[in-house]
Image: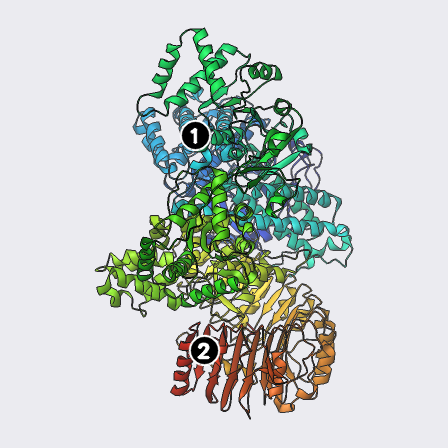
Amino acid sequence: MAVLPTRQDPLLNIPAAPSPLPAGRLEHEHDGPTPFLFPARRINNLALASTVLPKRVPLHLLQKITNDFSKDRELGSGAYGKVYKGVHKNGETMAVKLLHSMAGLDDKLFEEEFHNIARLQHKNIVRLVGFCHETQRQFIPHDGKMIFADSKYMALCFEYMHNGSLDKFIIDENSVHDWSTRYAIIKGICEGLKYLHEELNPPIYHLDLKPANILLDDNMMPKLADFGLSKIFEQERTRITQSCVGTHGYLPPEYIDRKVISNKLDIFSLGVIIIKIISGPTGYTQCAEMPSKQFVELVHEKWRNKLQTTMDAAALETYCEQVVRCIEMALSCVETDRHKRPSIGAIIDELNKMETNTDQVFSVDICSTPAQTQPPPLPDSSHSTEETSNTKGVSRLGPREYVQSTMRDLVIGITKSVVEGVISKAQSVMEEENMLLISMQHDLHFITDEFQMIYSFLSITDEERINNAVVRIWVMQTRGLAYDLEDYMDAFSCLDKTRKWWSRLFRACLAPPGSPYMSVTSLAVELKHLKARVEDVSHRNTRYNLISDAGSKPGLVRQQPVPPGAVAYENDTRRKHILGDLTQLITNKDDADLQLISMWGAGGGTGTTSIIRKCYSDPEIIQNFICRAWVNLSHPFNPHEFVRSLMAHFYANSCQERQGGIIGVDVLTSMDATATQGDLLSEFVQLVDKNRYLVVLEDLPTMAEWDSIRTFLPDRKNGSWIIVSSQKYEIASLCVGHPYQILDLKQSSPTEHSVCAFLREEVTLKEKKGGNRKEKIYVGDESEVNNGSTSTNSKVISTEYDLSHNHRMVANSKWKEARDWMQNSSLVGRRLQMYQIHRCIAEAQRNHSHVMSVWGIVGVGKSAIVRNFYCDRILENQQFQEYGWVDLSHSQPFNLKDFSQNLLTNFQSDSLQANETTPSRGILGTVRKCCEFLSTRHCLVVIDGLQSKEEWDLIQSSLVSRYSKSNTIIIVITTEASIAAYCADKDDLVFNVKTLETDAAFDLFENEISKKAPLWTTSLCDRGNSVTQELVSKCGGLPMVIVAIAGILATKVVSWMDTATSINLRFMFELEINPDLQDLFSWVHSCFRTCPDFIKPCIFYLSFFPRDHNIRRRRLVRRWIAEGYCRDSDDKSAEENGEFFFSKLLGMSIIQPESSDARMVSCQINGFFRECILSRSGEMEDLVIELADRCNLTTQRSGRHLVISESWDRDKILFESIDFSRLRSMTVFGMWKSFFISKSMKLVRVLDLEDALGLTDENVDQMVKLLPCLKFLSLRGCQKISHLPSSLGDLRLLQTLDVVNTSIVTLPASITKLKKLQYIRGGTTSITSEDPLVPHTSVSWLSKFRRSPLGGLEVPSGIGELTGLHTLGVVDIGASAAEAILRELKKLTQLRKLGVFGVNSNNCGAFVSAISGHFHLESLSVWLDEENGRCSDCIFVPLKNLRSLKLYGVLNRLPLINQLSKLTKLDLEITTLMQEDISFLGKLPTLCILRLCVEDVNAPFRFSVFTNGVEERSYQKLKVLEIACRSSLSVTFGSEAMKNLDLLKLDCCSGQLRRLFGLLHLSELKEVWLKGSYEETLKHDLEVQLAAHPNNPVLKLGKNTLCTLSWMA
């Protein structure tokens, strides 16, 4: 992190230079080195009120921070001195320029150099932060003898630029930096030079402008440096000098030949630099070797080829023009004649003109919505705009573009999370008013307000903005600023709030070494700097027009006027809503009066034209209206032109019915045939008298013109219609007359403007008579429609219908197609899901329910599962009479008429699924007929790809709600859980299809290979092959991806190993070029874009963990909290929100459970999603540094998160080349090295060393001292760690401490200082080897019942003061100070989770008393100390809110837990379990997980409850049952017990399980795990029972996943 020039801490409060003295006087210190001070006459241009003067730095301090000006700290050298890197002990850095001792470099010249730089205050000039001018008397050798001599030291200290100099950036034209970055550098250099040349008086000429003297800050902002050769001249004065200045290659001819110096010398150097920035280091040489025009064309061609792959055509042309103009400007700067070179002011003007043009492109092509940029639809009679769009107004991208856009959106989400965190923290800081200076309060209010606006902008960032390079750079800069502000807020939170403000002024001096904590004054100064950066970000936002004053729809116009009539429209109480489009309002009745619809759009016409056009081009409208005309009205009204226009359209529409010919020619021929005006008018009268007509009048301007037009369109009582559109609300309402009704028309794509239709009220009340029944289309309130209301207030339009009820058998061809599909599309690993679908359908029919839903991510195989059921029912042909399948996934926007017609066609089709619709009688007849089918016949309907709740509302209100007593079943397939729950009749009719487990995924892979390359199945499907394992794992259990990968390998059977290896290396690339996966990537893009922003940082965080790595849930949640991704909300704690986020990711299949265990202790990131994120890691290059096996040394690397892979070779040189000053988290897998921690890591929040090898106590002591900002520290599994240092108490921000499975038995007393600590976990559960060559011993989960853990933690006195603790364990209360520990424990009333060790007969009562007031306690784990006596007689748990209870160490009898009505998890190790105990447990109402270990079994376990000889339902909520026995045991399940049990685990490691009875009664059983010393007879018996089970549960043998205690997980 670059040193802030306004901060006082880097120099330990070294006093600033004293106040200026009168002219010519110097002030000396008599008892120390004599510093140089400047006279007052030289600082007339310094703005002392707004800047901080450079500080005087003692020589001894400079020597200390530069290692006595050592060679390894040298950054560069010049004619006047060398530059060294100074690193302060608190981690701050600066650049120290030590001037050479040479003739002529006297006090006067140094004074001139100092004042030249001290007066420079500009963002593109390196800021001077300090100076040193001292003389030391030294005893030195001279001419063979030792003498005393004065050694003069003169040094200037500058802010340190972490990105180095520009010459390192200029590699070639193909470097990673895009054009936007290069242009920003060019503009910054020019602005800095303009400041020197034109804004200073007198001006400064740099005279040595070159890339090495241009430094780049963290945001790539250029800053001019090295003014050692600068000269102060009067404006426009030219000098001739004999001294040598500048650098060869950047000097103009007039200086080389005649030593002429002017401001045009810098302009020449600037031109050379710009050429090299644009065309690379050899660009200037190429420029000299060819004509200028040819050079410009060459540069233009190279940049065009580079840019066209990343942007659209409009932006490409604008950027290319910018490249050309910049290179032409640079060529003018290197003109031989200096008088032809432009001034720096002219150059800036030219750049500003370029930006104006660029802003216009950004405003139109980037910031506007598609509705704003698309032209109005063409007058095509066959298609409308809505019908030709693909998906809700968004053009379909390619898979690669989908993935790229998805990752960019993920980065936006991360930025929003950080910005939101800053707003929240700033508001918390502002509440501490007594801690703030007045200026700080004002600055914080300003920053908060600005960040709220920034957050709003990020919230409306659409896809086009995300994919724009300028927006992405701005987002990156905003994110970096937000991180720095978070650091500031944390530093403020560490102030001692018990002290007065004046005592805190000196707080920094007392801070420990390396501490980031500052005094209030220092915080105030830094806040000024941060405020300035916030202003810069906002100004940059405005400069590029990324956000407009209009709010959410930026554009060229800064302020959008309110459309005329908008207020009247919003306040009109006659507004109603219509479900459908304009076509539904156009009735078809021969004897109806002339009808009129008037249209008005709130956006001044936006969207109105497309709605009318869709109606005008509808096939049904075309068929019903012979005479149709669309007239765009002109002002003033011309009646003759109006009639000619009507006749031209009448002719054109009649010509379209004839085949062949050119319509335009036919129209002209017809018009010529009635050449005279009288003939034309006569024919016009005949047409409108005898035919029904539809006339559209576009953009009616006044009522006077309407009155004139109306006289030409008579009412012949033949059902003719007129549609008028007007941009004036009053005109639109007056056209139809009073009373009228306003209908809001729903549009197919989201826009910000409403479109409404005015109708005379009696029109909406008319009904068309005829038929025995009426089909009603509601035009009233949506609520009435959705609820099936038939209120008399609802306005309806009705029509007749006719329908035959003849019974029809399934067509033979459809039956054969279903049979073929079942034979060729066997589902692998889905047997259980198929059974569950059948069960759901049967349950729905028994309960007279009609709608069930199936949901899951794209590619998971949900449609295949439903199709399997669908075909199975067709083959049976007994349950249903009609079968219909409608696919909506590619039919956006949704249209009820098309849906109904598709369904009707499919009912009568010979195919499984009809792909085309046939012309229908009209929307009313189609919907009515479809409704009749569903209400009178037994139908099985599948709606595949439902995308919104609004679509379901349309279907349900028109079709589903009309047949409450039918046996029709509708299965809705969707990708959204919320939509699935919304559609289903009951919660238990919602079915989620998960990704395949590992074994099933490999089975599918093998099945696909066997079908496509049967001779190579054995070699390609070797499960022991690591290449194949990795390949299948990366597919993430998605059948669509597995099939695609298998298809690629099946075509490369000879070289399959090389192909598989290649695919592993470029996995996403192979998928992105596969057209069959278009829908998958489209869904991923949509899923990530629409998922809540708070989830996106959590998704990104998962990519830190290796593939197939088990991640504990608690570990993830606590890290999210430390990073600020999970925060307290109004109704939930940060922990609860984190658990909610975890469940959301689980539902999205982004994470997968490690096993089917309901506890979800650990998970893995889905391999496919991980590859998606990593494939676009370049989008997050400023966020993550990953050191893995193929890591190379680069010139610049920095990031916020560091991940060290187990495969990395621990290259110290590479590691020390990385900039860690911004680092916030560090995760290490594998071996630890001591050089992993450095002083520059002082901002690290998360240090996760779980299961790291080689960590020692010395390492922990070092990291605690160097990482003062830690919030999360995990040393779990580091066996060599035996104690924590007392300096742990300095980690004031620490929230989480995890030392489980270390050798730590005592917490240091200083831990009581950590008032923010929320989570402490420790204790030893097992002993494992840290030797990577020694595998971990497989331990039965039964072993955890045997006096585990091996030990707890001894906590210090005073821990009861940590009132923020909500998780604590395992605490050893069996030690000598048990009473004191229990007293402290009693104070921790906010505990949610508690684990204690050493409970015995002596302390049991005191323990129960200590926790009796812990009303928030939800989880309690107790390990009994058997050596001091068993204590089951006194175990009583009076905690009504307890949800999880675990009692380990043998109990004599079941403890008193009858009051635990909320208990969901119970672990018991008990000597004997009596039948009454089993019956008691069966009555616990919420028990979900039960784990039992029984020592002595006197009788068989019979899980059942009887009352008066009748068996009752028991264990109704139980999902998981684990039984461990230490003696012979048989188990029987009653017929009414455990009806929801999913998983049964049996462990016979130390006992003998004889037999199990009644497994068939467990109707929901999915898996049985068997482990230990069981006999083959038991295994065989289990296999027989499970084979007869209708679910066909899976039997898993010998699998061990429970080697540690669940509480400690």
- From the viewer's perspective, tell me whether residue 1406 is left or right of residue 289: right
Q: How is the image coloured?
A: rainbow
- From the viewer's perspective, tell me whether residue 984 is left or right of residue 1004: right
**Residue 787 vertical position relative to residue 1113 in the rendered view, above or below:** above
Disc 1 + disc 2, Cβ < 8 Å: no
Give the x, y percent position of residue 540: 56, 36
Q: Nearer the viewer, mark 1 or mark 2?
A: 1
Query: Which numbered dot is residue 623?
Result: 1
Query: Which is more toward the observer, 44 or 1413?
Result: 1413
Q: Which of the two labelled residues, at mark 1 and mark 2, occupies the earlier sequence position?
A: 1
Q: Inspect this view and state whether residue 251 appears.
A: no
**Residue 1256 vertical position relative to residue 633 in the rendered view, above or below:** below
Residue at image position (47%, 68%) is: 1154
Query: Which is more toward the observer, 769 or 209?
Result: 769
Give the x, y percent position of residue 575: 65, 34
- From the viewer's perspective, tell me whether residue 374 is left or right of residue 579: left
Tell me the quarter of the picture where residue 761 sits: top right
**Residue 1037 vertical position relative to residue 478 in the rendered view, above or below:** below
Query: Which numbered dot is residue 956?
Result: none
Assign a secondary structure to mark 2: strand
Q: Amino acid at mark 2?
A: Trp
Assign a secondary structure to mark 1: helix
Give the x, y percent position of residue 118: 60, 37
* Number of residues whose C-alpha sits closer than 10 Å to that of mark 2, classed few (under 14), some (14–19) or many (20 or more): some
Q: Amino acid at mark 1?
A: Gln
Query: Which numbered dot is residue 1569?
Result: 2
* Number of residues whose C-alpha sits closer than 10 Å to that of mark 1, classed few (under 14), some (14–19) or many (20 or more): few
Q: CA distance from mark 1 to mark 2?
A: 68 Å
